[in-house]
Image (cartoon, rainbow, N blue to C red):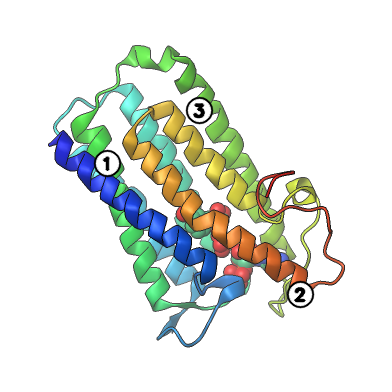
Amino acid sequence: MLQNFESLVLIWLGIGFITFITLLKIPAPYGKFSKTNWGPMIPSKLGWIVMEIISPLALLYFFLNGNIEKTPTNITFMSLWTLHYFNRSVIYPLRQNNPAQMPLLIAVLAFLFNVMNGYINGTYFGSIQEYSAEYMSNWNFIVGVCLFLIGAYINIKSDNVLLSLRSKSGEYKIPEGFMFRYVSFPNYLGEILEWMAFALMTWSLAGLSFMIWTMANLVPRAIKGHQWYHSKFESYPKNRKAIFPFII
Ligand SMILES: NC(=O)c1ccc[n+]([C@@H]2O[C@H](COP(=O)([O-])OP(=O)(O)OC[C@H]3O[C@@H](n4cnc5c(N)ncnc54)[C@H](OP(=O)(O)O)[C@@H]3O)[C@@H](O)[C@H]2O)c1
């Protein structure tokens, strides 16, 4: 089973690489890059709820139906994932203020992406790798959990700044304060930090694959979004980077 599983994850990573290259040229058409010529449109809140809630549902389905012991360490990994996705699929969409509509196709693609990542991680932690309770005293577990919480804080606080910027007219403004002083997309930076931390704490191909996929989605989008800010606002801060402070 392990060999087939690893082959599947490697194929999935290959698709992630192709996605990364594609997104550097064509940003996914939602939010700032919303397009109406990608087929039927749906309300953004509905799209976010449906396409994201499937991630923890798929994860928990494959985890709970797996045949290895559900140790406290494995349960901790699943809990962190589920908490992140409770925010993303329930709290975050309900707080969105007057968001642009999204193409149904984007919601369908994101749904499939989330099913696949839920399957890979639920299967790995439910059927393949049992982590002992002692594993929780390993340095990578402790550092990983701390970084995950810091990443979640950066992600949620930055999303809060953006959500509160949104006026009734739906206009975009220049975000200021917190980590927007350094980068245009601190919400993406926080999200990437969370999944880097997850890969570190689990030290697994499953965790690594989700980290790489998250970067494949968010790094190109931050680069494109950064260019979009510069083209839209003449007064956009010149020394702000796109996603990684002082680097890109
Ligand atoms: N793990 C992954 O692969 C993955 C993939 C995608 C997203 N995410 C996460 O999902 C969350 C949302 O992603 P996103 O791509 O929608 O983020 P985003 O483009 O930064 O938008 C976040 C929210 O703020 C609004 N907004 C953004 N910039 C604004 C501005 N300058 N002025 C006023 N309102 C503004 C957006 O409205 P509009 O929608 O109308 O633009 C949206 O409601 C992020 O936390 C991200 O990390 C994760």
Residue 193's disc is: none
Residue ID for mark 2: 232
Relative to residue 156, is residue 198 drawn left or right?
left
Query: Amino acid type of disc 3?
Result: Val
Query: What kind of element bears circle 1?
Result: helix
**From the viewer's perspective, is residue 41 above or below residue 59?**
below
Q: Is residue 125 shown to the viewer in this render?
A: yes
Name which of mark 3 and mark 2 comes first in the sequence. 3
Question: Disc 2, ligand 1: is the CB inside 8 Å?
Answer: no
Q: CA distance from mark 1 to mark 2?
A: 42 Å
**From the viewer's perspective, is residue 69 above or below residue 52?**
above
Query: Quarter of the image containing the N terminus?
Result: top left
Q: Residues within 10 Å of mark 3 (few under 14, many from 20)?
A: many
User: Residue 188: where, in percent of width, then height?
Assistant: 59, 51
Identified at 13% across, 32% down, the residue is 67
Identified at 48% across, 40% down, the residue is 195
Query: What kind of element bears circle 3?
Result: helix
Residue 122's disc is: 1
